[in-house]
Image: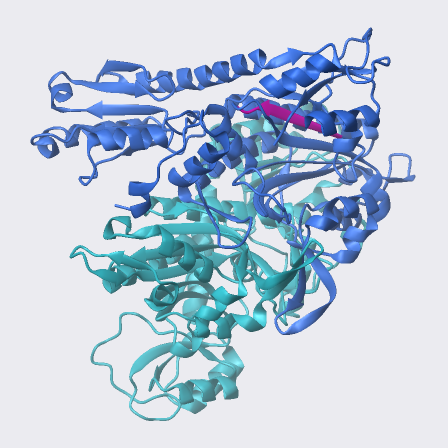
Chain colours: A cyan, B blue
Amino acid sequence: MKEERLVTRITPKSEDFSRWYVDLIRRAELADYAPMKGMMVIRPYGYAIWENIQRLLDRRLKASGHVNAYFPVFIPESFLRKEMEHLKGFAPEVAWVTHGGEDELEERLAVRPTSEAIIGHMYSKWIQSWRDLPLLINQWANVVRWEKVTRPFLRTTEFLWQEGHTAHETFEEAQEETLRILEIYREFVETELAIPVLYGRKTDREKFAGAEATYAIEALMSDGKALQMGTSHNLGQHFARVFDIKFEDRNQKLQYVWQTSWGVSTRLIGALVMSHGDDSGLVFPPRVAPIQVIIVPISVGNWKESVLPLACKLRDSLQQAGCRVHLDDRTEYTPGWKFSEWEMRGVPLRLEIGPRDVRNNQVIVVRRESQEKTALGMEGVEERVKEMLAAIQKSLFQRALTFQKENTREAESYEEFKKTVEEKRGFIRALWCGREDCEAKIKEETMATIRVIPLDQDKDLSGRCVCCGQEARTLAYFARAY
Amino acid sequence: MKEERLVTRITPKSEDFSRWYVDLIRRAELADYAPMKGMMVIRPYGYAIWENIQRLLDRRLKASGHVNAYFPVFIPESFLRKEMEHLKGFAPEVAWVTHGGEDELEERLAVRPTSEAIIGHMYSKWIQSWRDLPLLINQWANVVRWEKVTRPFLRTTEFLWQEGHTAHETFEEAQEETLRILEIYREFVETELAIPVLYGRKTDREKFAGAEATYAIEALMSDGKALQMGTSHNLGQHFARVFDIKFEDRNQKLQYVWQTSWGVSTRLIGALVMSHGDDSGLVFPPRVAPIQVIIVPISVGNWKESVLPLACKLRDSLQQAGCRVHLDDRTEYTPGWKFSEWEMRGVPLRLEIGPRDVRNNQVIVVRRESQEKTALGMEGVEERVKEMLAAIQKSLFQRALTFQKENTREAESYEEFKKTVEEKRGFIRALWCGREDCEAKIKEETMATIRVIPLDQDKDLSGRCVCCGQEARTLAYFARAY
């Protein structure tokens, strides 16, 4: 038995959310700290979630016409310097390679913090004509950003992500792509991760360094703080001008291409923990859970002869039916220990089989998210299990949606706004004059930022900015955020 | 139309193999040079092969009990220094990160050339008892080795690979794992890439820096040079001692674990090009081909009304049947241009449909590897296409196997050995005394190295070393290699 298993206690969520989060990630073996500041190791149980995320999102990206490629991890410093806004945005976070073997390099190489610059350079070679457009490339890769304050999955010096980079003939097409991806992200996160999101545009202050406009999906974690879950940028022609990405259009005229870029990262794993987890530990939605069904044989009497063969048969038939199932037949742990272990690790369904169940040709099923316990006859158990997994997925989404709705509040005055942020957290829906002054003041005084500006606003919007009282230009969702 | 398409001619393979290789990779859009020395971009058509390789190998690794994880891309210099052989082996090839943002780091970080050191450190934290063993972890990742002479896919500063790292209770178990993986690699490469390999142990001179013993699979490229396709190392307790990876064994005694590590890389894509390609371009085995079937409609007369609908239907039904199929319905290229384009890009099967085929309810099928042309009735065409793909896979393997056998020669004297290397290339099967002197002399004088020492040797081996004439200790396969 591992020593740490014996000694580590998980801080209850209600006691200290931050400690609970970190304790749980290590105790459940999702990730561990690496010996280098701010870096982590994604352990097999955590990486299995990433593999599920990759598979489910990659399928959507391919179905919408995107293809994968791989660009170098190093970017020459001069490339980053070409787009000043981009450089300013990323320079403080760049890890620099200065030596190759024994030799000092003539030019420093950035370990990619994002790949617009190197991809822009390649696109200028690959794109000649409108026939080469749209170019719809995605990359699954590691990136490095030298962060001062880090937290596993949410903000680490290195993380894994996908970054899409597309080039189009017109602004309209690029804008359409930007919003198409935003919608793919929304649908993906809500369907597969069971996390409801708000979506919309970021303010200029919060947008990507070098973008024309940034769009994002944002979710509310169960401590009432918001988390940015994915971003989609309309890059306009900024990078095209800098990297000279021109094409001959349908009228034989040379034009700069219009670009987008977009990404989601291993941060999504942190979101799963913080959205669904409880005092007993992780709660994974079945569609991304590494293990969907855990079978625990009740090890009494001659269980190895009576119970175990049936448990094995059950595992095989569930596997056959397409479930990710694991049979915990270890002899060094008691059934009770296993119950709480797999509960802590967030497995959606637990199946218990003891001698009595064998006699009754049944199995006891316990749902992780509701603790609901049912006896199921062995006949057709595979179908029932699959139905229950679907029900759990739905229930988790509904629960998170209810939480989100209950924690999205209106604020009509600045006093009300400040009080709500301080006492209740959550999203605040309020009017804004659109000036960066107010945005900055709100951030300074309340630590709340504008998370998104909703896309479809009432054209007849009227009212006063929640901060300055001047005429409002837009509705916005505010929150304290990770 | 892309300019480069108009101007680039591929050097014939028979004229200059090296140029042919590089021309083809760029012209077929498998990869392109990056602006940093020795680095490449893997373009979507090349990356699709890597995705197929990943899927097909990952399935085998998981079926044999391995799980995936992700370790940091940076490794502190002090970690590499702990194992001196390992450091000596890799130090000249390491890219060093010295700055994070504006700050100089206290300790340089290596961009991982391989991950034994960081994984060893983590394993020392995770492994306590024999119950934690075996630990069977694999990682799909990028690695960097500062190479002086590079060539796309074969040797680049950055490449993609998988690296397995396992820990076991006994030497025997580690050895069993080392050979199990060697066999998985052999079966995978022969089945999926249709490349026959020799396999066996490496000499001490050629083994991995820090390993007890290295095993490899080696294939013969069609220019008669050998290529190492994958390696599997028994690491003994070297890294366990250095990183203090101890476990309590079944008798409550503390022991060091026994480890293995093993990997294959994007080099396999280069092997596909060099094994199967011909003067007309690439020839991909169907099981890893990005596109298995290309449909070219014969664009004459009112083809858009008569031919195209049937071509679309054919595409859909082949897709439905599980084929990777693409319909080239571009109007700006002639059918003839498309034939040679997709031939050059190595698509195993071409389906042509013209007005006459529509009338006869048939399709013309052309096999890339043999240029064999057949008319197939539309009835049951999906099954016939799948049979033909299987036949092509088999035929490519057989052809490569014949080539390998015809180019594996015995040498009984050093004169014969030198003559064969110089005039014929290929593998040379010869006796060796086992001394590094002879190995070094052969390399210096002939540029041939020992590729592998076969595992199962006749116990009654007798004869003389092909180099020094002293009593032979073993049989070995020699070749000039990439």
As displayed, is residue A183 above or below residue B68? Answer: below
Residue drawn at (81%, 8%), measured in percent from left and top? B463
Compared with B375, A213 (above or below) is below
Horizontally, residue B376 falls left or right of residue B359, namely right
Magenta range is B214-221
Looking at this view, name the residue that lies furthest to the bottom.
A469
Q: How many marks?
A: 0
Q: Residue at x 46, y 58 (%)?
A: A118
Measuring from the top left, give residue B48's x and y in whole percent.
Answer: 43, 38
Q: Which residue is located at x 47 percent, y 74 percent?
A: A426
Name the spot of residue A263 as percent of width and height, x first: 44, 58
Q: State which quarter of the image contains the C terminus of chain A.
A: bottom right
As drawn, which residue projects farthest toward the left?
A: B302
Residue A337 visible somewhere in the drawing: yes
Lateral position of residue B2 relative to residue A375, left or right: left
Q: Position of residue B259 (x, y in %)?
A: 77, 37
Q: Main secondary structure of the magenta part?
A: strand
Would residue A233 be counted in the magenta stretch?
A: no
Q: Determine which quarter of the picture holds residue A463.
A: bottom left
Examine the image and state in which quarter residue A172 appears: bottom left
Q: Is residue B63 above or below residue B22?
A: above
Drawn side of residue A305 relative to residue A186, left or right: right
| Residue A7 pos. (x, y %) | 80, 56
Q: Nearer the viewer, residue B351 or B72?
A: B351
Q: Residue at x 55, y 62 (%)?
A: A274
Residue A361 appears in the rendering: no
Image quadrant containing the N terminus of chain A:
top right
